[in-house]
Image: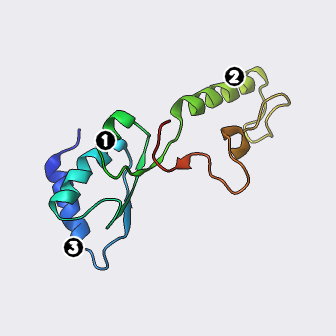
Amino acid sequence: MLEMAFLEALADRLLALSPRPTGLFAWADMLTAALYPCLHRRGLQPGREISVVSRNNEWPLLFGLWPRPAVVHIQRAKLGRRALEQWLCRMQNRREPDAAPPAGCRRYSRRDAGATAGETPALHAAGPA
């Protein structure tokens, strides 16, 4: 649970820094949603005077924020599926821990996540998932 007193103090510390940071990364959308009002109360306009990048892509939490922050979407469901596939494959094809993946075990790459050359698949401007 986020304590508003903590967030208010965090916003004050941010304003006191010299030079002031040009952006911040919030580890969760819940933090971003709570931090926006703290920044507004101090006269900072998120997205204009300070860039905000949030994580998780939880749209119900980000819905009322304007401008919407950039979002790093880690795609937890896809990540979990891939981890389970790797684990099952390795359990079926046991080898030394440092050995190369067994034949038939799929390696995943950026291209598997839909990336094209020069693109990072999980980092995108805020928009519908």
Looking at the rendered image, the disc whose residue lies closer to the viewer, 2 or 3, is 3
The quarter of the image holding the N terminus is top left
Residue at point 75% right, 42% down? 98
Q: Position of residue 80 (x, y in %)?
A: 57, 29
| Image-quadrant location for residue 39 | bottom left
The answer to whether residue 109 is visible is: no
- Secondary structure found at label 1: helix
Three-letter code for the amino acid on which mark 1 is drawn: Met
Q: Nearer the viewer, residue 41 or 25?
A: 41
Residue at the limit of the structure toward the right, as seen here = 103
Pointer 2 or 1: first along the chain: 1
Q: Position of residue 100 (x, y in %)?
A: 80, 40
Residue at point 34% right, 41% down? 62
Q: Residues within 10 Å of mark 2 (few under 14, many from 20)?
A: few
Instruction: State how far apart marks 2 and 3 are (Cα).
Output: 51 Å
- Secondary structure found at label 2: helix
- Left or right of 96 on screen, residue 27: left
Asked if labels 3 and 1 touch by Cβ distance under 8 angstroms, the answer is no
Residue at point 72% right, 49% down? 116
Label 2 sits on residue? 88
Instruction: State how far apart marks 1 and 3 are (Cα).
Output: 24 Å
Looking at the rendered image, the disc whose residue lies closer to the viewer, 2 or 1, is 1
Label 1 sits on residue? 30
Three-letter code for the amino acid on which mark 2 is drawn: Leu
Three-letter code for the amino acid on which mark 3 is drawn: Ala
Asked if labels 1 and 2 touch by Cβ distance under 8 angstroms, the answer is no
Label 3 sits on residue? 16
Q: Position of residue 22 (x, y in %)?
A: 37, 70
